[in-house]
Amino acid sequence: MLYLCATPIGNLGDITLRTLETLKACDAVYCEDTRRTAQLLNHFSIEKPLVSCHTHNEKMRSVEVVAALKAGKELVYVSDAGMPGVSDPGAVLVQACIENDLPFTVLPGASAVLTAAVLSGLSSQPFSFFGFLPRETKPRRQMLDAIASTAHLCILYESPHRVQDTLKDLLDRLGDCEAAVLRELTKKFESVYRGRLTTLIETFAEEPKGECVICVLPELQQAGEAVDPTSVMDELLKTLSVKDAAAVAAEKLHIPKKQAYAMALEQKGKGE
């Protein structure tokens, strides 16, 4: 069996008893960073062989894992913090197990996404998780467009070096909506900053310390606010084709796709 185990995102006390028992009983631990995992195991007086398995070698390691599982080994996979496969390696190992009809399971535990969703204080049902925004211009713009078309809470991870830039990009694409930035979750200096994007941009004029989670509620979810379909379409057509703008508008405005496409054609014609 392969056990994908969630590990603490800051406070070591958040590890589960089940994960500790599984770590003690397994034959080997595959991990994103052997140094960080060694610190975790040492804290709980656990000694096990550690094998590095990160983004750049996960495909190769999956072959080893398959062979070990076929030989009857009990293996654990942990990423640096949180749940493997959620903005962390682990998905390749899962697919390898499925393709080879080998057993695997997930041991739940600490999760920055779930912690942030509740701690943000924003409406969290439903929510969408987008991971880290790409740095490259085109895919970054595409993800921002996807966030703008999402009619509920959106959650992002971000490095402290880029928090303010990401908040500015969100402001430019979404307008001045309600948001929250959560820093150093579960750690001693855990902090939560709530307010509109303009306020948070000022708050993070100086680079913070520690990893951050950004939660943002697109303006369409602000209760009682009227939405101008023409303005929405005009904004979408600045960066998207008629077809793509219509698809996004249909979801955002909750109208039929044919109606959105006709509107996009009409607005495009007026602008030419």
Image (cartoon, rainbow, N blue to C red):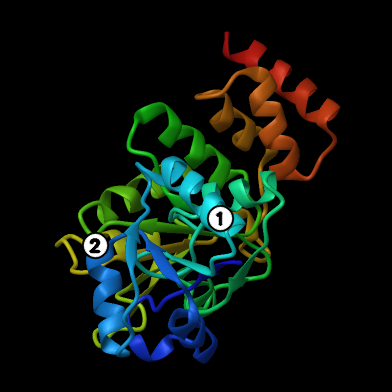
Q: Which residue is mark 1?
A: 218
Badge 1, how many Cα within 10 Å: few under 14, some, many 20+?
Answer: many
Between 136 and 238, the one nearer to me in the picture: 136
Count of number-bearing discs: 2
Of helix, strand and loop, which one carries label 1?
Answer: loop
Task: In the rendered view, tell whether residue 238 sits above or below residue 97.
Answer: above
Type of amino acid at the residue the image marks with label 1: Pro
- SS for dot 2: helix
Residue found at x 63% / y 52%: 97
Residue 174 in view (yes/no): no
- Relative to 17, residue 110 above or below: above
Callout 2 amino acid: Glu
Q: CA distance from mark 2 to mark 1?
A: 19 Å
Q: Residue at x 32, y 90 (%)?
A: 44
The image quadrant where one finds the N terminus is bottom right
In the figure, 169 relative to 53: above or below? above
Answer whether residue 21 is visible to the viewer in this image: yes
Specify which label sits upstream in the sequence, 2 or 1: 2
Quadrant for the C terminus in the image: top right
Q: Which residue occupies the foreground of this view, 133 or 34?
A: 34
* Residue at 54% in and 66% down: 73
| Residue 164 position by quadrant | bottom left
Q: Position of residue 251 (x, y in %)?
A: 73, 42
Q: Residue at x 72, y 16 (%)?
A: 265
Residue 31 as seen in the image, left or right of residue 92: left
**Number of other residues with Cα within 10 Å of mark 2, as a class: few under 14, some 14 to 19, many 20 or more:** few
Marking on residue 24: none
Residue 202's label in the rendered image is 2
Query: Residue lying furthest front in this view?
Result: 71
